[in-house]
Structures are given as structure tokens and as C-alpha cells.
Amino acid sequence: MTVNDTAGDGMDRELTLMAVHAHPDDEVMGTGGVFAKYAAEGVRTVLVTCTNGEQGDGPGGVKPGEPGHDDAAVAERRLAELRESVGHLGIGHLELLGYRDSGMVGWEGNGHPDAFANVPVESAAARLAELMERYRPQVIVTYDENGNYGHPDHIQAHRIAVAAAEMTGIPDKLYYVAVPRERIREMFEFLRSSGMAPDDFELPDDFGTPEELVTSVVDVSAYVENKLKALQAHASQGENIPMLQMPPEAQHRAFSHEFFTRKTSRVDAPDHEDDLFAGLRD
Ligand SMILES: [Zn+2]
């Protein structure tokens, strides 16, 4: 449905982009470019990070559950890295919901009562709704229903973002980060040929976003360097970030465009657009 807002409400407020992410470091690959680009254009930018990333690697690559993994120290380090990343991307406002990282599917941390994935959707959504009321973003970006790759915290971030958007009725356009299937396939082939992915690992056929669901492609090639620096800021998670080991040409190719599925829009915008604010500018 398209509604033209002739009363001016919504059209005269400051253009604002909000992205809702699960962990420190998630802001970079799918949305780092749009953050940097829109911030440079004077759009207000807000990153909401739902968890503290406690289930990330500790110093020396020590994994959660292994001796020497200190949740509090990991969280502190990752939040410092997040602040550095936010600086490289020019993000104006960082909002931390402070929930506990649930860990990957099947990890022991999944069962922790405070884990983000176990928090009732209504209560976390109510907190996010307050931030939506405060910033009144016309554009909100989050993950798809599957959290883009099945991580319980990404799925929960999706759920609370959609619930808060419905509760408040604030965003004019709601997007899911898209990871086009073809791009993943290319990247995976590259990782395998360079020995960075195990030979026996096969990409599931349904991995990634089918091409026909991608509505919006934003050229962020001018901001590849910002994304790279932001990703490098998350150095403690370096082992889990294969993009950091790729040669510069492959990085440029992987970082230069960001893809989205537009789920809802109350403004007139083309079916295929190259600007998340299409239909929202004077
Ligand atoms: Zn994540």
C-alpha cells in the first residue's frame, strides 16, 4: 500500500536511518556502506546493537566454553571495538540494548536465561520502540526472518525490529539485509580455491537471498575503505572474519555494493531502487 503524506508529517523531519543488529561487528558487512554513505550526505544515522557479543572469541582466539574465556572481558573488548568501527563508518548514534549474546545454534549459551534469544519479544521490542520514538527513522534495516543465516540472536533482532516497527508505525520503509545467492557462491568459490574454506563443506542450495527478492542495491564503492577499517577494528574476532584475509580486489568486489529486500513502504518508490531514501526526499 502506498500513502502519500501530504500533511507534511514525515516529510519535514530529519532524514534518519536506523539499523538493528545483533552483535558488535554485524554492522559492517551488510550496512557499513549505507551508514558511511548516508552519514556523509548528512542523514542522521543510528545503530542499535542488541547484544554485548559475550560469546565471541577471547584473547588468543579462545572460544566460549574453553578455559580462560571471560564473558565480561570479551564484552568489554568487543564494545570498545564497536565504538571504533562506528567512528570509521561515521555513525552518529550508537544505542546498546545490552542483552547477553546467545551464541551460535547448539552452543551451551543458548540456554542461558538472560540470552537475547530467550528474552520475550514484547519486552525487547518495547525498548527498541522507545528508540524509534526518539529518533523517528524513516528507514529501518534489519535481518530477514531467518536472521540471514540462522543465528538465534539475528532471528531475535529481526523479530523485535518488526514488532517495534508495527507497534510504533514509525518507519516509512522497512528493509531486510539481502545477501544475494550468486554473490555468496562467488565468495565461497574464492574461499575454497584459496584454502580458506574446508574442501568437504558444501553451501546449502537455499543459502542467501534469491535474486528476485532483492529490491534495492546501493553503490557504496566510495566507502570500501571505511568498511575495511571498521571490520579491522573488530580485530578480536579476526579468525571468524574471512573477508579480512581476502586480497584487496576480492574485498573491493565484496564490499562495493549493499543489497536489501524492501519489505514495506508507505511512500512511492520504484520496484528497483538504488537509494533507501527513494520517495522520501523533496
Ligand atoms: Zn552477529
Image (tube, rainbow, N blue to C red):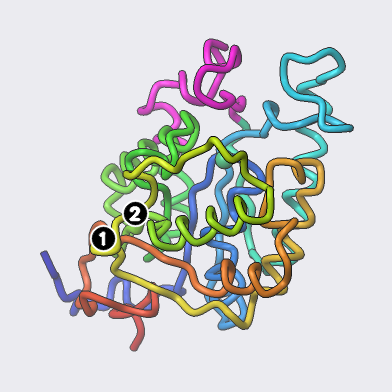
Q: Residue 13: x percent and y percent?
A: 41, 73
Query: Residue 30 location in percent, x, y?
Result: 52, 59
Residue 65: quadrant of the picture: top right
Question: Residue lying furthest bottom in this view?
Answer: 282
Question: At label 2, which amino acid type do we have?
Answer: Thr
35 vs 119: above or below: below
Q: Quadrant of residue 252?
A: bottom right
Left or right: residue 79 compared with residue 34: right
Label 1 residue SS: helix
Q: Relative to 253, does residue 193 appear above or below in the rendering? A: above
Task: Tell me what residue is drawn at x 75 percent, y 56 percent.
Answer: 245
CB under 8 Å between discs 2 and 1: yes
The question of residue 237 being in magenta is answered with no
Residue wearing tag 1: 213
Q: Is residue 182 left or right of residue 131?
A: left
Residue kind at label 1, given as amino acid type = Leu
What kind of element bears circle 2? loop
In depth, the one of 60 and 89 nearer the eye is: 60
Q: Residue at x 48, y 58 (%)?
A: 18
Please tell me in which quarter of the rendered image ligand 1 is found.
top right
Residue 238 coordinates in the image, percent (x, y): 77, 46
Using the image, determine if residue 173 lies above or below residue 67.
Answer: below
Q: Which residue is mark 2?
A: 209
Looking at the rendering, the stretch of residues picked out in magenta corresponds to: 99-127
Taking the spot 26% from the left edge, 60% from the top edge, the residue there is 213
- Quadrant housing residue 72: top right
**Mark 2: few, some, or many residues within 10 Å (few <14, many ≥20)?**
many
